[in-house]
Amino acid sequence: MKYKLDKNEIKNKLLEIVSSDQLLIDSLMRDHTTFRIGGPADFIVFPESEEQLADISAFCKSNDIPVFLMGNGSNLLVRDGGFRGVMINTRQMNTVVTEGTRVTAQAGASLRAVAQEALAHSLSGFEFASGIPGTIGGAAIMNAGAYGGEMKDVVAKVHLMTADGRFETVDGADCHFGYRQSRMRDAGEIVTAVELTLTPGNADAIRAKMKELNQRRRDKQPLNYPSAGSTFKRPEGYFAGKLIQDAGLKGYQVGGAEVSQKHSGFVINADNATAADVLQLIGDVQHKVKAQFGVDLEPEVITIGEDTRDEN
Ligand SMILES: Cc1cc2nc3c(=O)[nH]c(=O)nc-3n(C[C@H](O)[C@H](O)[C@H](O)COP(=O)(O)OP(=O)(O)OC[C@H]3O[C@@H](n4cnc5c(N)ncnc54)[C@H](O)[C@@H]3O)c2cc1C
């Protein structure tokens, strides 16, 4: 990819918006994703405010520089050649405040931190999300869910930046939440903050529920290996993990990537897997499940970046 500006000019322009400790150059995406896979991103910026976010986006847009918005990278597979463009990481925008039953979190707040805030205020309804390793922005975009709960149930309002740079607030009911879907995802909008409406509850009961759900996760999921969670969406009328297991693919390996022995719905990075290993394994699993059961498995994990890096 050839930029209109040279890389040094891009760096200097970004440093007019953010400070040097908010900018990484050529940093490996394996250090920024839960899969621990991925080549270098040309630039990663960590905005601390909506103004910085807007300025970075406007600068990239006017110079035709590709932008990708990420939270905790817990649903991402970045290819081995890395990412050409500016990766905007929301992790520094992470304030969480509570007023009554309303918890408002900036996009980069971790779901764990938001769940702890709800617990501290004896607010119930967010326990389901406490063990999902993402940010609230990523969870809103994906309508993340677990154990019978989903973001859709608790989101009162989403604050966002539209693709053309306007800030808007949208009611939860207008977010068109579906299975791992939202209007923000469809429209390429950036979530800047999320307001949740929760229910007054009992702190001990909330804590006990979070503990129980997290224990269930540890019992069922291969949390001791890097992964991006469930690799495939749940196909209508089936469970992806069961189909994969029934196809005899439990423990199936390509290079360092493996269908988890503990939970066949998870592809794990068992031993220095490359993105190419994971993508080949995903393709093999799709092919075999289709051949045996006639079911199409659609990845839930989002793949970005390039296979190789051309010098620019
Ligand atoms: C061990 C493990 C367990 C998991 N369990 C679950 C589970 O139970 N349920 C579940 O639903 N998911 C689960 N996941 C997947 C993942 O944690 C969720 O999808 C999570 O919501 C992703 O959040 P993130 O901040 O990491 O997003 P990222 O992975 O960084 O990004 C995911 C997508 O969201 C977009 N995005 C992120 N932030 C923003 C923003 N502020 N504005 C606009 N777009 C944004 C990105 O562009 C990308 O398209 C699990 C993952 C792991 C590793």
Image (cartoon, helix red, strand yellow):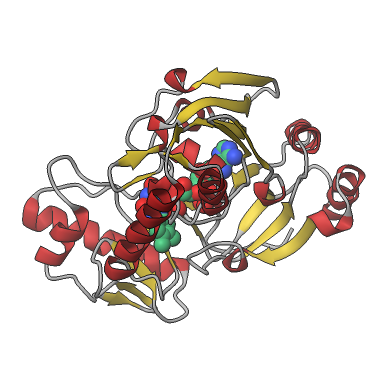
Q: Residue 110: x, y in percent?
A: 57, 51
- Does 101 appear above or below 82? above
Image coordinates of residue 86 in percent, x first then y, are 70, 48
Percent coordinates x, y for residue 107 in the rendering: 62, 40
Residue, x 54% and y 55% (percent of image)? 73
Q: Which of 212 and 30 is in front in this view?
A: 212
The percent coordinates of residue 66 (x first, y second) are 66, 42
Q: Residue at x 87, y 42 (%)?
A: 17
Residue at the limit of the structure toward the bottom, as seen here = 271
Which is more toward the observer, 307 or 128? Answer: 128
Name the image quarter holding residue 96: top right
* Residue located 55% across and 46% down the image: 114
Look at 42% across and 44% down and name the residue there.
202
Which part of the image, by quadrant, shows the C terminus?
bottom right
The answer to whether residue 301 is seen in the rendering is no
Q: Which of 159 and 236 is in front in this view?
A: 159
Vertical placement of residue 8 versus 157, above or below: below
Q: Left or right: 227 with respect to 251?
A: right
